[in-house]
């Protein structure tokens, strides 16, 4: 009996031992899998951030800057030391290139300095700091690369993609006789003045305006001229802001300045419009990060003309002073469109809103 109990216990111990060994193997395998997963995630994080973690030590890791921007730089301050800063163009192998173009400077009298890029800066730059004291000196350097942005404005229909007609009738002309508000009262008066008050007084409708659209697109480009530089921001990484002007051609009686009411109150894609007193001057649109294109609707009063050209409204929409923010503080001081890019694509094609005839009252003459 004693031997039987001992055998049973032995078997039981062997079974427990096998289970323990199996559990240990499973635990070891899980540890290996967990370690592999953690390492894989770490590599993914490194891969996803390394392109943005520019250190400026080589041309391929240069800091990206934009035309017209300013940037502060610094080294530690040491007692009795003097500091001399410099900036030149750099070749793609990192060697010193030609002098920086006019307008690109670095200014300082101490351990801090300010880099200012010209409105047409391009290429790669080498920034140096020479620190000296006691007859000895140390030279530090890093590299910057220039990227550019461009805004293109096109005249479109409401979908933002279809080209607008160069010339078409005002929106009153498109109204049909199925509603009483289509009719102009049988009065001698006309709406040649172009004000909302005149409009409401002369037809049986309110808030009847012309609506036209422009599509504005932001893009970025690599202006460094050296291959393999990592981490250039995309257009979606930038918040952007531009001034705009709605202007008519110098034709008598167009009165575009008084006639345009401005941008519609509906704001696409989070854009923020300013509210100028008149629309022949400068106003702004600010577009949030992540939005690279917006379609802007514009309102203008409907006009009646006394001839087939009187009170027509030729106009263009022009964007200027395009600036960006790439660090999230919304101060728009991180550079902008170069002077060269500002001359290309920033103005829409000309459109003309043709006036309806100022038809006098109907009279019975026999």
Image (cartoon, grey):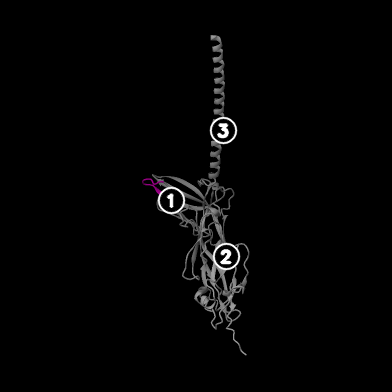
Residue 2 position within the rendered picture, expressed as x and y whole percent measured from the top left: 53, 9
Lateral position of residue 50 relative to residue 134, left or right: right
Query: Gap in Å between the C-alphas at discs 3 and 2?
Result: 55 Å
Residue 81 vertical position relative to residue 341 in the rendered view, above or below? above
Number of the front mark, 3 or 1: 3
Q: Quadrant of the C terminus?
A: bottom right
Residue 137 vertical position relative to residue 352 in the rendered view, above or below? above
Residue 314 position within the rendered picture, expressed as x and y whole percent measured from the top left: 58, 73
- Residues at marks 3 and 1 touching, judged by CB atoms closer than 8 Å: no
Q: Residue furthest front?
A: 1
> Residue at horizontal 55%, vertical 44%?
48
Mark 3 surroundings: few (<14), some (14-19) or many (≥20) residues within 10 A? few
Mark 1 surroundings: few (<14), some (14-19) or many (≥20) residues within 10 A? some
Residue 339 vertical position relative to residue 1 in the rendered view, above or below? below
Question: What range of the chain is rendered magenta?
Answer: 76-85
> Residue at horizontal 53%, vertical 42%?
45
Asked which secondary structure carries label 1, the reply is strand
Residue 351 position within the rendered picture, expressed as x and y whole percent measured from the top left: 59, 70
Magenta residue check for 307: no
Quadrant of residue 108 in the image?
Answer: bottom left
Mark 2 surroundings: few (<14), some (14-19) or many (≥20) residues within 10 A? many
Query: Gap in Å between the C-alphas at discs 2 and 1?
Result: 49 Å
The residue beneath circle 3 is 33
Magenta residue check for 84: yes
Of callouts 2 and 1, which one flags the residue occurring earlier in the amino acid sequence? 1
The residue beneath circle 1 is 84
Q: Quadrant of the N terminus?
A: top right
Front position in the image: 215 or 12: 12
The residue beneath circle 2 is 214
Q: How many marks?
A: 3
């Amino acid at each position: 009996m004693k031997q039987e109990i001992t055998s049973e216990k032995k078997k039981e111990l062997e079974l427990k031992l096998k289970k323990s060994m199996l559990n240990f193997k499973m635990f070891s395998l899980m540890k290996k899998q967990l370690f592999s997963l953690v390492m894989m995630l770490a590599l993914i994080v490194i891969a996803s951030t390394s392109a943005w973690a520019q250190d400026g030590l080589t041309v391929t890791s240069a800091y990206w800057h934009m035309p017209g921007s300013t940037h502060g730089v610094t080294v530690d301050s040491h007692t009795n030391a003097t500091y001399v800063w410099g900036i030149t163009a750099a070749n793609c192998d990192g060697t010193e290139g030609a002098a920086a173009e006019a307008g690109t400077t670095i200014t300082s009298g101490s351990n801090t300095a300010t880099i200012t890029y010209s409105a047409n800066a391009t290429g790669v730059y080498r920034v140096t700091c020479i620190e000296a004291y006691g007859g000895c000196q140390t030279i530090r350097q890093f590299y910057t690369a220039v990227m550019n942005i461009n805004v293109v404005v096109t005249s479109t229909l409401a979908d933002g993609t279809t080209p607008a007609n160069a010339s078409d009738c005002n929106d009153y002309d498109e109204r049909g006789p199925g509603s009483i508000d289509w009719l102009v009262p049988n009065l001698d008066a006309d709406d040649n003045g172009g004000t909302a008050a005149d409009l409401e007084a002369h037809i049986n409708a309110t808030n009847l305006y012309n609506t036209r659209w422009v599509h504005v697109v932001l893009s970025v480009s690599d202006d460094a001229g050296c291959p393999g530089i990592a981490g250039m921001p995309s257009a979606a990484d930038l918040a952007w802001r531009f001034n705009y002007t709605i202007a008519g051609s110098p034709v008598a009686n167009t009165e575009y300045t008084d006639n345009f009411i401005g941008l519609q109150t509906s704001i696409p894609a989070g854009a923020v419009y300013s509210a100028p007193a008149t629309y022949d001057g400068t106003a702004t649109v600010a577009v949030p990060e992540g939005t690279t294109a917006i379609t802007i609707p514009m309102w203008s009063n409907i006009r009646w003309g006394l001839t087939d050209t009187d009170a027509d409204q030729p106009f263009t929409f022009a964007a200027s002073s395009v600036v960006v923010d790439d660090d999230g503080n919304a101060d728009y001081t991180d550079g902008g469109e170069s002077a060269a890019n500002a001359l290309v694509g920033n103005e829409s094609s000309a459109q003309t809103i043709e006036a309806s005839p100022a038809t006098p009252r109907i009279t019975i003459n026999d």
